[in-house]
Image (cartoon, rainbow, N blue to C red):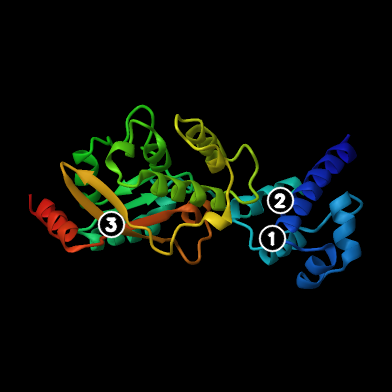
Amino acid sequence: MSDTIVTSKISEFGRLLRRWRQIHGYSQLDLAMTADSSARHISFIETGRSKPSREMVLRLCEVMELPLRERNKLLNAAGYSPAYKETALDQTGLDPVRKVLDIMLANQEPYPATVMNRSFDILMVNHAAAKIMNAIGVPMGGMDGPPNALKLTLHPNGFKPLVKDWEKAAQHMIQRAHRQLRGKEEDDPLAQVLREVLSYPDIPGEWHFDDPTQDAPPVLPIEFDMNGMVLSFITTIASFGTPQDITAEEIMIESMFPANELTEQVVKSMADQ
């Protein structure tokens, strides 16, 4: 009975390893040389003829630079316990992370900043972002959970009526989601969000695929039409450099900066109110 369980786990590990290897464009020999192993050993662990050690699994994950969540999946598939925790942002273990986020949000004032997870759920906002979200009628939290930036951008009752050149902005968000999904399984939470937003009305069929030839310009201003005034922002995305927790790794801090003088004046006047 135990042999059957091990074989099943190794088979799943082999499937995942082969999938990630092919996504990164590695042959078995390429991966073996980079991981200081042999093509024969890589072949054996992919087919289930050999069981990789825990150290080998982690080394292969490191070589392919897999996200921490995916490293845990490979470890589990090979029959080992996870190496990385996933701590809720409001738990004590992430106190240092929250402190850094609080500092970043405060330092971004009077300009908006938000903290999101990789599924684009909005977890934290600074005062400037809260004022803008209140002004356009976006509630923070509730029975349905936190607001989701991807859903808000794509839904016909979300940002769509407020965003100038909505199609460019929306397509850029979709492409960001596709890039973050590269290699992930269909049950990934972000994949589920992406399927939902692509089912919204008036979403072009070609947006169902990530087309690198259609990338947005290097900097795409996001423009909101608020009461006849067009507010234009340039955004930056920051993340933690050395995460050892899945939640910390998947956090995105999006900061918005005025793209013109009018926007700067309006944002600063809102901060004084």
Between disc 1 and disc 3, the foreground one is: 3
- 213 with respect to 147 (left or right): right
255 or 12: nearer the viewer: 255
Name the residue rendered at 24%, 42% in the picture.
133
Q: Residues within 10 Å of mark 1 (few under 14, many from 20)?
A: many
What percent of the width, then of the height, locates residue 209? 59, 45
What residue does disc 2 label? 74
Contact between labelled residues 3 and 2, with CB atoms less than 8 Å apart: no
Please determine whether, in this image, residue 140 is positioned above or below residue 68.
Answer: above
Please determine whether, in this image, residue 94 is positioned above or below residue 240.
Answer: above
Q: Element under label 2? A: helix
Q: Is residue 159 visible?
A: yes
Q: Amino acid at mark 2?
A: Leu
- 145 with respect to 270 (left or right): right
Between disc 2 and disc 3, the foreground one is: 3
Q: Amino acid at mark 1?
A: Cys
Disc on res. 233: 3
Name the residue rendered at 54%, 52% in the picture.
180
Contact between labelled residues 1 and 2, with CB atoms less than 8 Å apart: yes
26 or 8: nearer the viewer: 26
Where is the N terminus found, in terms of image quarters? top right
What residue does disc 1 label? 61
What percent of the width, then of the height, locates residue 47? 88, 50
Q: Is residue 130 visible?
A: no
Q: Amino acid at mark 3?
A: Phe
Q: Residues within 10 Å of mark 3 (few under 14, many from 20)?
A: many
Q: Residues within 10 Å of mark 2 (few under 14, many from 20)?
A: many
For marks 2 and 3 on the same chain, the one whose residue lies earlier in the sequence: 2
Disc on res. 116: none
Q: CA distance from mark 2 to mark 1?
A: 8 Å
